[in-house]
Image (spheres, helix red, strand yellow):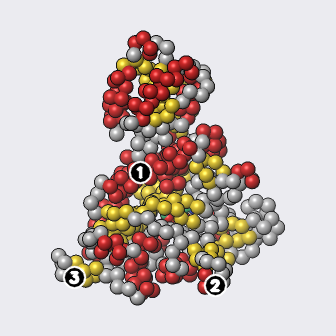
Amino acid sequence: MVEMDVLVSLCKRRGFIYQSSEIYGGINGFWDFGPVGCELKRRIKDSWWKRMVQTRDDVVGIDTSIVAHPQTWIASGHVASFNDPMVDCKACKRRFRADDVPASEDGSTGHICPECGGELTEAREFNLMFQTHVGATADNASVAYLRPETCQSIFTQFKNVQMSGRMKVPFGIAQIGKAFRNEITPRNFIFRSREFEQMEMEFFCHPSESDKWYEYWISYRFEWFKNIGVKPEGLRLRPHEHRELAHYAKGCTDVEYKMPFGWSEMEGIANRSDYDLGNHMRESGKDLTYFDEGRKEKFLPYVVETSVGVDRTALAVLCDAYREEEVKGEKRVVMGFHPSVAPVQVGVLPLSGKLAEPAKKLEIDVRRHFVSEYDDAGSIGKRYRRHDEIGTPFCVTYDFESENDHAVTVRDRDTMAQDRIAIEKVVEYLRDKFAFSK
Ligand code: ATP
């Protein structure tokens, strides 16, 4: 398994992920995705959207604002209790989550700073929501929050979406968007950051059917991770024990991935009962019940939620794809991405700058069918190495012979085998290759 510092350095070198505001020394808990990383993230999101919305007739998508009416967060319980206990070091002033500080020998929370050995304060509750002010006056009345999760506006817009979309329960509402949490100790690269993206879906159903849908979504979501190429041996489902469940939750199961730092949550699938709609109905005074024509029954739907982080998924995909091999005594680093998430699917490389014109022409052709890139920077060996490291499944090389035999060399990232293919057959050849790996 790849060590995190090796992965972090590859991500920077190849344009996957940089530290945010690096020239100013960085800002803890924030990351920027470079050209290759943003493509990886975009493809993960596209795959989720396709699987969750576009290929189903019972889930629709929405895209809501990051800042919502502050009452939203009172109703959801975030203002009162979206807290982590934290401790401060009196000597070095660092702040830690209380449960990250190793316990003392007597089993109680430690009182010694893990960084400098200094004395720690007692644990205090710390609200994780970022506050801001709306409008010109910064007083209590103008306080608003950056959303700590994307799902609450799915609940508050439930009725609008149901009525305007003429949706019949059971149905789901999906959303992809940024969320913000002022994590006390952001860590493990993009695993725990302060600004991240979530892909959430709330499935509204009759209370009597919520157990069935809960089981359904657990297996549907688990399959998705395999579909984007994550190896099954690195994945597991972890049902929450009764004591871990929130009082309103009827069940919760995490999809976990075996990260270099241990088994870690990627996604939570939860049967949240009618807790959220009930809260918003009470707080807003608006009727959020649903009248079922078939059953002739009015009820407050139960909700099965699937909630996954884009960044955590990207990290799992990156860790999973990394491999080192020895080729002729030299180390080869390969990101073995599944073609459905590879940032570049096909690289088109002219052997020499003199071949730019016909190679570019070929790339324009390839581009119509695949995510492709024209690359003429540096020696061919260096270009192959780069494409191995950004995980390009196939590289097409246009050489001097191509002018005579009207054929090009297609190199397979994984086997490094090279096939000579007629230029007019290249797209068909690649299509077959990609279909095979579906
Ligand atoms: P954790 O216990 O790791 O803090 P959580 O249980 O609070 O996570 P949820 O509130 O269930 O997380 O959020 C759903 C998903 O959003 C998580 O499974 C994760 O993929 C993602 N997520 C949550 N917090 C962060 C974060 N700070 N950085 C990156 N992704 C996050």
Residue 180 shows up from this direction: yes
Label 1 residue near ligand 1, CB within 8 Å:
no
Query: Which residue type does callout 2 highlight?
Result: Asn
Q: Total marks drawn?
A: 3
- Going by the image, does 236 lie left or right of 193? left
- Of marks 3 and 1, the one in the foreground: 1
Q: Quadrant of the C terminus?
A: top left
Residue visible at 46% across and 75% down in the picture:
246
Mark number displayed over residue 297? 3
Residue visible at 51% across and 78% down in the picture:
69
In the rendered image, residue 291, in percent from the top left (x then y), is placed at: 24, 80
Mark 1 burial class by Cα count in 10 Å: few <14, some 14-19, many 20+: some
Mark number displayed over residue 318? none
Mark 3 burial class by Cα count in 10 Å: few <14, some 14-19, many 20+: few
Residue visible at 44% across and 27% down in the picture:
361
Which residue in the structure is indicated by mark 1?
A: 46
Which residue in the structure is indicated by mark 2?
A: 140
- Going by the image, does 260 lie left or right of 232? right
* Mark 2 / mark 1, whichever is N-terminal: 1
Query: Which residue type does callout 1 highlight?
Result: Asp
